[in-house]
Image (spheres, rainbow, N blue to C red):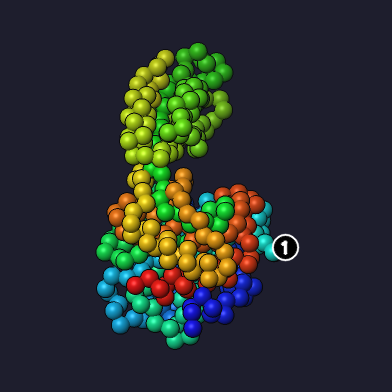
Amino acid sequence: MNAHNLPFDSNRMLDGLRPWIECESPTFDAAAVSRMMALAAADLVEAGAHVETIPGTGGFGDSIRATFPHPDQGKPGILVSGHMDTVHPLGTLEKLPFRVADGKAWGPGIMDMKGGNYVFLEAMRQILKAGIQTPLPVTFLFTPDEEVGTPATRGLIEDHARNQRAVLLPEPASPDGGAVIGRYAIARFNLLTKGRPSHAGWALKDGRSAIAAMARRIPQIEGMTTEDCTFSVGVIHAGQWVNCVSSECHAEVLSMAKRQEDLDRGVAAMLDLQGEEDGTDFIVTRGVTRPVWEPQPGTMALYEIAKGIAAEIGFDLNAGSAGGGSDGNFTGAMGVPTLDSIGVRGKGLHTLDEHIQIDSLAERARLAAGLLTRIA
């Protein structure tokens, strides 16, 4: 029996996925993410896995590692790598509740990427239930900090990926339903302007506003964007009392480039902006970076397997490189065969319209089961 013909039922899968969606897990709430990990761990154990909890570090939640019974356990195999953190703060369920309508299901994190993670769990559940032995041992690694660049668990992911035959990432599918076989480079920067405080009412002219200084820098930074390297200011924090001229302003920048050399030039340009201007200091520090992942023969071989399975299921699976980072940047850049964005179909990730196509749950579970039983 071909594994992709196992009895996958989208509606039954949605019932199992719902508790995951209603367990909110924003990256910056370590306890919330750890609750989500515990929920996933219980489902993995029920599916037949041995699960270990890896305590969180750096202020982030726990990770979990699940291994499935296999005579070659411990030897090179398949790593399913996913994250359980979301960009949605606690309370988002009030604005974006789990709901179903017109063949779609909504909820925070349902597309990015709890839906895909659940799909692969269900694939392994059905494989084991059918008594099918995967050619290679399978390990799941779910981590808590991908949405902020994976500062705490990059090493953990790389250690688990090293020497594996394949890494599969159930990130959401591309808009056309396709997979990702390469990703652009990503760099983050932390910005700080330091001003001179004063009373905003009777001594305004004595102050130098850190907020105003940052405001002048934003168009300068975003104006550096080219076709080869983009810059976007996405976070700003400053001020506590409106009657005080601000002394500090913090901001964060995301930069993306298709080639490493373009990103390197962008990094140099950002660092060159530092200095003093009109009594305020501007300080730029480098944050986490995702390296360029370029398609390699091992990844292309994985894609050909996936493309063939998709054709048997009844859909075309395109592939290409993509902007937007993932943990596939790390494993792909290591040279480990990596296939990314083979999770659910949907739209609106990172927004209050985040939803999936319900029938893509079974479609992608069939693809997952095919991959897990054919990669050798």
Q: Residues within 10 Å of mark 1 (few under 14, many from 20)?
A: few
- Considering every residue shown, the one lying at the far top of the view is 205
The residue under the point 52% across, 66% down is 310
> Does residue 137 sit above or below 169 in this rendering?
below
Residue 314 location, quadrant: bottom right
Instruction: Estimate the x, y position of residue 343 in percent, counting from the top left.
Output: 51, 62
The residue under the point 34% across, 72% down is 376
The residue under the point 54% across, 78% down is 5
Instruction: Estimate the x, y position of residue 80 in percent, counting from the top left.
Output: 40, 66
> Does residue 337 sit above or below 5 in this rendering?
above
> Taking the image as drawn, is residue 24 in sight?
no
Question: Could you tell me which secondary element the residue under label 1 belongs to?
Answer: strand
Q: Amino acid at mark 1?
A: Ala
Residue 289 location, quadrant: top left
Task: Identify the residue position indicated by label 1 in the image.
Answer: 101
Residue 140 location, quadrant: bottom left
Give 372 or 210, whichever is nearer the viewer: 372
Instruction: Estimate the x, y position of residue 124 in percent, counting from the top left.
Output: 46, 76
Give 350 or 292, whichever is nearer the viewer: 292
> Does residue 311 sit above or below 276 in this rendering?
below
Q: How many marks?
A: 1
Instruction: Estimate the x, y position of residue 51 in percent, counting from the top left.
Output: 38, 74
